[in-house]
Image: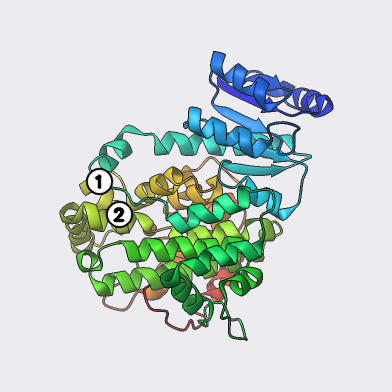
Amino acid sequence: MKRILFVDDEPSVLQGLQRMLRGQRQEWEMEFAPNGEAALRLLEQHPVDVVVSDMRMPGMDGAKLLSEVTRRYPQTVRIILSGQTDKEAILRSVGPAHQFLAKPCDPDLLKETVARACALRQLLHSEHLKGLVSQVRSLPSLPHLYVQIQEELQSPNASLQRVGQIISQDIGMTAKVLQLVNSAFFGIQRRITQPAQAVALLGLETVNAVVLSVKLFSSFDQALMGRAHLTTLWEHSMATARLAKRITLAEPDGPRLANYAFMGGLLHDAGKLVLATDLATAYREALALAEREQLADWVAEQRVLGATHAEVGAYLLGLWGLPDPIVEAVAFHHHPDECAGRAFSALTAVHVANALDQESRHTADAPARPYLCADYVAALGLTDRLPAWREMVGVAVEQTSVP
Ligand SMILES: [Fe+2]
Ligand SMILES: [Fe+2]
């Protein structure tokens, strides 16, 4: 039995949810609260597995409530169910919320969202993963610049202009962001010289993704991983991000998921950086095993380390509070069939993009290992899309140097 708390200041919305979810009573124990304060009182008496909250409420709003839930009950799944479509309001809730759903919400979508979120938590809190992560001396902290941007977005008078100013204060980051933004990767015709322009043109989520990955790649000891390996990983991450976004945009629900797919693609192998830096000996052993027995790298990692770079990466991003669709895409990018969802998602795009990019990198003396989970693609009814996806691979990308 999962315990779920719904919070909304409009009684009709709560009644609607109650009616709509009546069939779930065998699986869910549901509570309803009319405002944030009442929700926190309920939680004090009895913690829950999932909180689903409205965004705009008098007094404590949804973002504030979920921030408080994050602080007091970090294990709880947090979902915003909002009638607002205003983009900045959505962004404000990105930090504290794992998922964002729009009202009116289809009951099946709500059920699937809760199931996926709970399955992901189960993976991230599993014993074997905790055992491995406990050997990592220090996980990189969430880049300060990213935290500042999130804080700006939480403030009532947040603006993209201000976000640009925040990035400008970090000169090193500004240089790297502009270098990347001006590379052929984004295909922008005119030269961008200000972070604020980059934010306006590419959108905040993309710039945020760039900030995060630039920080991640530059924070690791390049000597440990080997420059060549790191360059390959960076190029593969960029290519996966771009391809995942293109795949997503060709789907009916694409625009909603495209940024998740992009960010998931950019960060999907972040766990490799953690493993190579902190568990260098064991990681090298895993790479050697993969080479010797022609295994996929993650299969070898599973054998040597007991968990894979996908899980370690997802653990890190989960700790950083990135939205669930991104964490999920990273966690299951090698075996999406283990995820609870059966609809096209950012995970689908990242899985396919990663697999196709990997395949395209193989040469005659290093034959392809099986990366694409054909059963999963078939289960989603998307097998007929494969030829179109393959055509999207390999569109020449100007080389971008490792930040
Ligand atoms: Fe991977
Ligand atoms: Fe990958």
Q: Give the quadrant of residue 64.
A: top right
Of the pair 374 and 214, the residue shown nearer to us: 214
Q: Would you call the spot at circle 1 few (<14 residues within 10 Å), some (14-19), or many (20 or more)?
A: few
Q: Quadrant for ligand 1?
A: bottom left
Q: Which residue is mark 2?
A: 274
- The quadrant in which residue 384 appears is bottom right
> Quadrant of the rendered structure where residue 377 is?
bottom right
Quick check: 274 above or below 198? above
Nearest to the observer: residue 189 or residue 397: 189
Q: Answer with left or right where residue 379 lies relative to residue 284.
A: right
Whole-angstrom CA distance, mark 2 to mark 1, is 8 Å
Say which quadrant the C terminus sits in.
bottom left
x and y percentages locating residue 67 in the rendered image: 56, 36
Q: Write the residue at 44% across / 74% down.
A: 176
Q: Mark 2–mark 1 contact, CB under 8 Å?
A: yes
Q: Is residue 227 above or below residue 125?
A: below
Measured from the top left, where is residue 175 in percent x and y?
A: 45, 76
**Observer able to see residue 352:** no
Please tell me which residue is depicted at 26% across the width and 37% down the height of the picture.
Answer: 131
| Residue 252 in the image, given as x and y percentages of width and height | 71, 59
Q: What kind of residue is marked 1?
A: Val
Q: Which of these two is toward me, 13 or 197? A: 197
Query: 20 or 391, which lies in front?
Result: 20
The residue carrying mark 1 is: 136
Which residue type does callout 2 highlight? Val
Q: Is residue 330 above or below residue 106?
A: below
First-in-chain label (2 vs 1): 1
